[in-house]
Image (cartoon, rainbow, N blue to C red):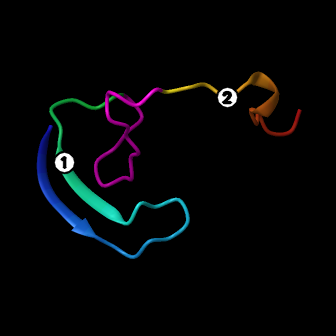
Amino acid sequence: GEILEVKKIPVEPGSSGVQMRIKVDMMLEGYRPKRIVRFYPAPWKVIALPREEEYFGRE
């Protein structure tokens, strides 16, 4: 997508301190405009958690 804006924001737990506005052509179902979306650069490996470390709520 097209990067519209990049700005520094206060660093808080779970935040890198960088906020970006990006215009995308298509979004997956479930994502809505004006929401926070985490994304990862293509070179980063996405490693799934081991099953015993996943949280499924009350069972």
Q: Nearer the viewer, residue 17 or 21?
A: 17
- Residue drawn at (46%, 61%) of the image: 15
- Residue drawn at (74%, 32%) of the image: 54
Amino acid on which the number 2 mark rests in the picture: Leu
Asked if residue 53 lies left or right of residue 8, the reply is right
The tag earlier along the polypeptide, 2 or 1, is 1
Q: What element carries label 2?
A: loop
Q: Which residue in the structure is indicated by mark 1?
A: 22
How many circles with numbers are drawn on the protein? 2
34 part of magenta stretch: yes
Q: Nearer the viewer, mark 2 or mark 1?
A: 2
Residue 7: x and y in percent read 22, 67
Q: Which of 32 and 18 is in front in this view?
A: 18
Q: Give the range drawn in magenta.
A: 29-45
> Is residue 41 depicted above or below 46 in this figure?
below
Amino acid on which the number 1 mark rests in the picture: Ile
Q: What element carries label 1?
A: strand
Judged by its main secondary structure, the magenta piece is loop
Q: Which residue in the structure is indicated by mark 2?
A: 49
- Residue drawn at (30%, 55%) of the image: 34
Q: How far apart are marks 2 and 1 (CA)?
A: 28 Å
Asked if residue 55 lies left or right of residue 12, the reply is right
38 part of magenta stretch: yes
Q: Quadrant of the N terminus?
A: top left
